Image (tube, rainbow, N blue to C red):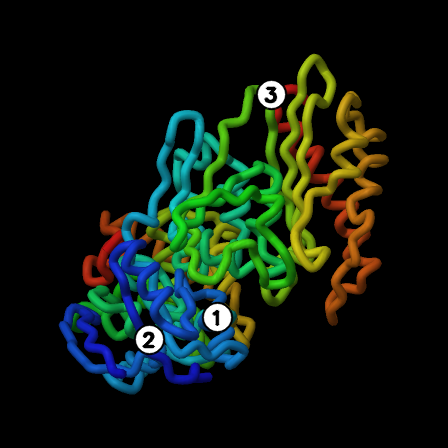
Amino acid sequence: MKKAISVTVNGVPYRHEVEPRLLLVYYLREVLGLTGTHVGCDTTSCGACTVIMNGLAVKSCTILAVQAEGATILTVEGLAEDSTLHPIQEGFWEEHGLQCGFCTPGMMLTALQILERNPEPSEEEIRHGLDGNLCRCTGYQHIVNSIRYASRKIKEEGGTAIPETAGREGR
Amino acid sequence: MIPAAFDYHAPSSVDEALRLLRSLPDAKLLAGGHSLLPMMKLRVVSPGHVIDIGRIQALRGVREDGRELVIGAMSTHWAIESSPLVRARAPLLAECASRIGDIQVRNVGTIGGSLVHADPAADYPAAVLAVEAEMTVVGAEGQRTIRARDFFTGVLSSAVRGGEILTEIRVSALPPGTGQAYLKFPHPASGFAVVGVAAVVRVRGGRCEAVRIGITGVGPTAYRAEAVEKALVGTTLDDRAIAAAAEHAADGVEANEDLFATPDYRAHLARVFTKRAVRAALERSGRA
């Protein structure tokens, strides 16, 4: 039996009838057409499907779309404001934080969670924070550099890492 | 990977969840879903009904009740790791939570879901054994309490019966002079504990007055290393005494085997990590 869900993704409200077994990542990709969120391992390991839901980075391959009822979600498509890149995107651009780019959306959104809780992390803290994200190009050093860039940039701008459009913890 | 079809229910109270659990055949409770959904995707389990108790606000949060710390079963690992109350009153649980999976997993997975799932390589079982936590469950016949040492009954099996819901985890305040530590050897790919050792050590007058060791990852269920505990009580907890006691960390346990670790290697790791965990707990006891 299908269930109705209402969610706000990147500031846009949606309402759909979905099968309960539909995973959030497939809802985002196939129902909403937001294919920036990737399916890597499909087993909660690689982090390519990471999105921010109610202010928290989550692996959308291990959440049912129906569990997201009422949630506010940010995907990679919602990071830039108009044509201005988010500091984390700018960091990946400036520091060559990607090679093939498959892990990048998940890396960037996890990075925001790291920076939200620890605005000026050490290299070791960044690496520990990325425990749940895999880069098969093994380009970790540049990813770490990109996150440090974003940390400096966010501090300079005096903002918070996770934008308002990602919702807040505790629904 | 797509789970088999099921009907979804999202009760807003424990009573409503219990009613659903009684009336629906072939139903599974969904907490954070980070154990259940992977199993459903692999079709290891294919319940006809899923009852999502993750939305029941009464099951979330941490509070004090007299001398006890009460953790709602739907509290996430992150909520436990970051709670000032847990860090002050039961630092072992906060440390243990911080070692689970990764940031994203800790944002969603819950202590209640993990405990009832009773994975032999999960982290919390070692910690709840070492702090002698008590689990409160409710069912048709009302409420009952399960001690940590009676809670884990087998691989993926707990003492929570069908029709019951784990609602909270209660931990008594520990007296001064108590040190606690959780040390783990994580599987390099999955992050699960190949071996995890939780130690609670109480020192008085330069001697070990009491000690509790919980070990996960080694056997079919987490267990209390009683032989180690007996060997430590009354000693001055010098390196020699700790090393001698830790030799008994896997006594009487049929150690698990997988591609990563043979039973002998697991038992060896249990001894090494027991030694380290007792030392770490001792350092934090304020004596050292």
Residue ID for mark 1: A44
Compare residues B166 and B184 and report the one nearer the observer. B166
Residue at screen point 69% across, 43% down: B224
Does residue A114 appear in the picture of this structure?
no
Label 2 resides on the chain identified as: A
Does residue A5 appear in the picture of this structure?
yes
State the image quarter where residue B165 is shown: bottom left
**Left or right of residue B234, residue B78 in this image:** left
Relative height, residue B234 to residue A87 (above, below): above
| Disc 2, SS | helix
Q: Amino acid at mark 3?
A: Gly
**Left or right of residue A5, residue B3 in this image:** right
Q: Position of residue B52 (x, y in %)?
A: 34, 65
Camera-near label (1 vs 3) is 3
| Disc 1, SS | loop
Residue ID for mark 3: B177
Compare residues B109 and B46 and report the one nearer the observer. B46
Q: Amino acid at mark 1?
A: Thr
Q: CA distance from mark 2 to mark 1?
A: 13 Å
Residue ID for mark 2: A24
